[in-house]
Amino acid sequence: MIEIDIKHHIQTSEGKSILDIKAKIPENQLVCISGKSGAGKTTLLRILAGLTKPMFGQIKFGDIIVFDSTEKINLSPQKRNIGFMFQDYALFPNLNVEENIFFAQPLNKEGEWAGKLIKIFDLEGLKKQKIEKLSGGQKQRVALARVLVQKAPILLLDEPLSAIDREMRIELQDEIIKSHHLLHSTTFVVSHDEDEINKMASCILYIKNGKAELVYIK
């Protein structure tokens, strides 16, 4: 169970607002986060990851309190055991495709899962390619593979498929779903695509006017 009860200042197109999120999400859900631009979707992911410190509240991952403003608890991102795919990909430009993916693999783990992801995401012909030579869609596939290779129990994917053509997008939707079930992870996906949300999500976290509503659809 992931329990979120936080408040945080955000800047919207209409001025300053308060992101006031209260939600209890059972483990192993694939949660699509939906809402207008500027609603706080990316901010929520950054708060869960420990990259943004909320103004007030508490966050629990199972029995572990990762943030508590009253008790002054704020675990670092490294201690939260999450995988985060950023909108800007955050790939290492000095490493090639294969090196970027293997870099994220946990220490002392076999490379079979990394190799499988390289095949799934159609990156075999690009393994030795430098990141700067890739298209936006190719970078996005590398970033997604790099997150999944960690086998983290919580995955945070910020618009993971936005720069990919429709055919590849549909294929990777299937692979995210399969990887989610294979890893038994709790996966959060920010998306604006209704078809994508309806296909992938077991529940939807709608953010509107700073408030969140959790709706189960599967």
Image (cartoon, helix red, strand yellow):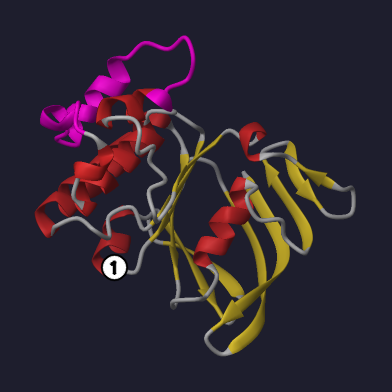
- Image quadrant containing the N terminus: top right
Left or right, residue 183 beside residue 174: right
In the rendered image, is residue 181 in sight? no
Residue at figure coordinates x 24%, y 66% from the top left: 195
Q: Residue furthest right?
A: 71
**Residue 197, how many percent across, how many down?**
32, 62
Residue at figure coordinates x 62%, y 50% from the top left: 51
Identify residue for label 1.
193
**Residue 15, how many percent across, how many down?**
61, 88
Left or right, residue 173 beside residue 59: left
Q: Residues within 10 Å of mark 1 (few under 14, many from 20)?
A: few
Q: Amino acid at mark 1?
A: Asp
In the rendered image, is residue 22 in sight? yes
- Tell me the quarter of the picture where residue 100 sits: top left
Residue 120 included in the magenta stretch of the image:
yes
In this view of the protein, which residue sits in the foreground, 61 or 28? 61
- Image quadrant containing the C terminus: bottom left
**Residue 71, how many percent across, how many down?**
89, 48
Residue at figure coordinates x 23%, y 53% from the top left: 136
Above or below, comparing residue 166 to residue 38 in the picture: above
**Residue 152, how many percent across, how many down?**
49, 32
The magenta stretch spans which residues? 103-129
